[in-house]
Image: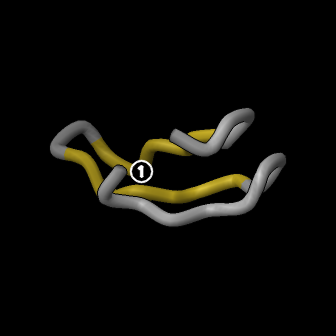
Amino acid sequence: ALIKARVGETVKVKAPRGTMQFKILEIV
């Protein structure tokens, strides 16, 4: 994974449409 995050952490990513929020439920 390109983004390292802890379980349950919310990650904000800059996307063409705007700001997307990803909630990490699992670590791949």
**Residue pictured at 50% horizontal, 65% vertical:** 4
**Residue pictured at 35% horizontal, 50% vertical:** 1
As helix, strand or loop, the secondary structure at mark 1 comes to: strand
Which sits in the foreground, 20 or 28?
28
**Number of marks in the rendered image:** 1
- Kindly indicate the quadrant of the structure image that contains residue 27: top right
- Kindly indicate the quadrant of the structure image that contains residue 5: bottom right
Q: Residues within 10 Å of mark 1 (few under 14, many from 20)?
A: few
From the viewer's perspective, is 15 left or right of 10? left
Vertical arrangement, residue 15 with respect to residue 11, above or below: above
Which sits in the foreground, 21 or 2?
2
**Residue pictured at 68% horizontal, 36% vertical:** 26
- Please, which residue is most extreme toward the left here? 16
- Please, which residue is most extreme toward the front here? 28
Q: Identify residue type, mark 1.
A: Thr
Residue 23 point in image, percent of width and height? 68, 40
**Residue pictured at 16% horizontal, 44% vertical:** 16
**Which scheme is used to colour this image of the protein?**
secondary structure
Pointer 1: what residue?
19
Vertical arrangement, residue 2 with respect to residue 8, above or below: below
Residue 10 point in image, percent of width and height? 70, 53
From the viewer's perspective, is 7 left or right of 16? right
